[in-house]
Amino acid sequence: MRDCESEKGSMVTKILTWTGVTLAALATGALTYALTQSNEEEDQNEHHENQ
């Protein structure tokens, strides 16, 4: 019985760990995308002002 419980605990730990890693990766990707978009808008605005 003990082994089954420890396996469940290990599985929960793995799931929580991978969920955390996935969420961190998604947040990093979203932040990078948002920063890239705002930089592109600034570049376009500067390009129009220079013409």
Image (cartoon, rainbow, N blue to C red):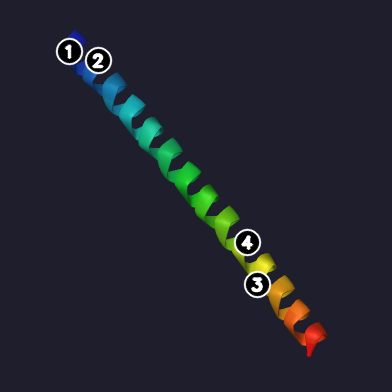
* Cα–Cα span, label 2 and label 4: 42 Å
* Cα–Cα span, label 3 and label 4: 10 Å
Residue under label 4, please give it: 34
Label 4 residue SS: helix
First in sequence, mark 1 or 4: give its number.
1
* Camera-side residue of 46 and 5: 46
Percent position of residue 45, x then y: 76, 79
Residue under label 3, please give it: 40
| Residue in the picture at 32% in, 29% down | 14
Q: Do residues under tags 1 and 2 come within 8 Å of each other at their CB atoms?
A: yes
First in sequence, mark 3 or 4: give its number.
4
Label 1 residue SS: helix
Residue under label 2, please give it: 6
Q: Which residue is outermost to the right?
A: 49
* Cα–Cα span, label 1 and label 4: 46 Å
* Camera-side residue of 33 and 43: 43
Residue under label 1, please give it: 3
- Circle 2: residue type: Ser
| Residue in the picture at 78% in, 90% down | 51
Could you say which quadrant of the image residue 40 lies in?
Answer: bottom right
- Above or below 6: residue 28: below
- Above or below 39: residue 45: below
